[in-house]
Image (tube, grey):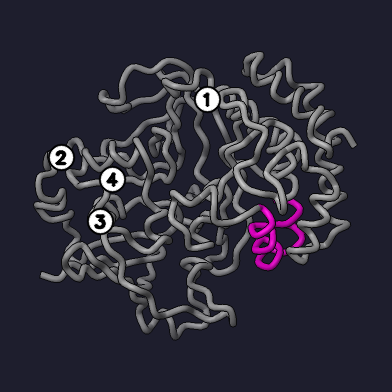
Amino acid sequence: MVDILQVWIGDRRVGAITALGGDRSIFTFDDDYTDDAQRPTLSLSFKSATGGLIRDHRSTQTRLLPYFSNLLPEGRMRDYLAERAGVKSSREFFLLWALGADLPGATRIMSGDGEGPPVGAGGPGDAAPAARNDRALRFSLAGVQLKFSALSGPKKGLTIPVHGNGGDWIVKLPSAQYAGVSENEYAMMSLACAIGIETPEIKLLNLDDIDGLPADVGRLEGGVFATRRFDRLETGERVQTEDFAQVFGVYPEDKYERASYRSIAGVIWRETGERGLTEFIRRLVFSALIGNADMHLKNWSLLYRDGINATLAPAYDFVATQAYIPDDKAALKVSRSKRWSDLGQEELIVMSRKAGLPEELVLSTAAETVAAFREVWGREQGNLPIDGAAKEVVETQLKIVPLARA
């Protein structure tokens, strides 16, 4: 039997992933999609150097092409959802089959007959039980943190649907390893919004505010960070999005290694122009000032608001990570260095010249961001739900980052 997964963007079929046997699969575009000059964008990774569409793709073993692999969660979240779906987490064709109805962006993956993965998708010897309809969660949110897709209700709380899918909010549960991380993220996202960075609506809730939370998530303490999904409209319409691991065609495990902020900036400048580049520089400088060492490729995304043209998606995952893991380095190189202590005007000038960016715009945006941050931090830090460790990180960054000293 040949298993085929249909690939859709909204209501438009764009291609298919075909299982070839032996855990191999291959992705192909539909001719109707490739021949359409006004086709919706699936990913920039499928864009050729001349602006056309790359049509020929290699088959893959166990994994899928990076674009599709990056639609799936990582780490604990991946194992959790795979176990509930009765699918072996490493077999990406079947995991995407199980979770494909509620993916990031407007991409949907469906089997031809609408049925779930076949018996045996867990693989020989796999102990994962066959999923029961009342236990399976059919959503996928990229990342490693335990989080759920939720619906807003008439009150301030949120509800996780029975099958987990269809939500317009993302609920991120407290971390058993890092105390206060929800409060930390809420504070840093609030700061970002206050200095003019585009952010989605956010909430800091209690666990009791979340209805429908699965009983098997374990005992947790602390606040719940919730953010409205920017890839879902109030009408229920889905908006296509992709992170920069997808843009560059790299697998999630390479999100810290295979690019730099300079290469991200180059794509943003070419695809989104001055508005996107200005926003990128704000976020880069802001991350340095709060000690956020985790702005890897999957924490930057593009959003296709009109279905075709890229814009920079709203900011997300701003956390003062150095309060938990002391590190004087960014997740990626800016241009020559990862060290925050090297992030001065010279580093930005080198980045601008190598990426073909307007140097004056980059430097003026960086200076304006520092000034806005200092003003807002001085006024609001006492009103934010963060502990002394996070505050100390910010105060230290304001002393060691050359842009802040300037």
The Cα–Cα distance between marks 1 and 4, rounded to whole angstroms, is 24 Å
For the residues carrying marks 1 and 2, which lies nearer the camera in this image? 2
- Sequence-earlier tag: 2 or 3: 3
Q: Which residue is mark 1?
A: 182
SS type, badge 1: helix
Q: Which residue is mark 4?
A: 138
Amino acid type of the residue that numbered disc 1 sits on in the rendered structure: Ser
Q: Residues within 10 Å of mark 4 (few under 14, many from 20)?
A: many
Looking at the image, residue 208 lies above or below residue 116:
above
Residue at 70 percent of width and 19 percent of height: 391
Q: Are marks 4 and 3 in contact (CB under 8 Å)?
A: no
The Cα–Cα distance between marks 1 and 2, rounded to whole angstroms, is 31 Å
SS type, badge 4: loop
SS type, badge 3: helix
Q: Which residue is mark 3?
A: 97
Question: Is residue 276 in the magenta section?
Answer: yes
Q: Which residue is mark 2?
A: 128
Quadrant assignment for the N terminus = bottom left
Q: Position of residue 344 (x, y in %)?
A: 82, 43
Amino acid type of the residue that numbered disc 4 sits on in the rendered structure: Arg
Q: Which residues are magenta?
A: 261-280
Residue at 54 percent of width and 56 percent of height: 258
Splitting the image into 4 quarters, where does residue 404 fall? top right
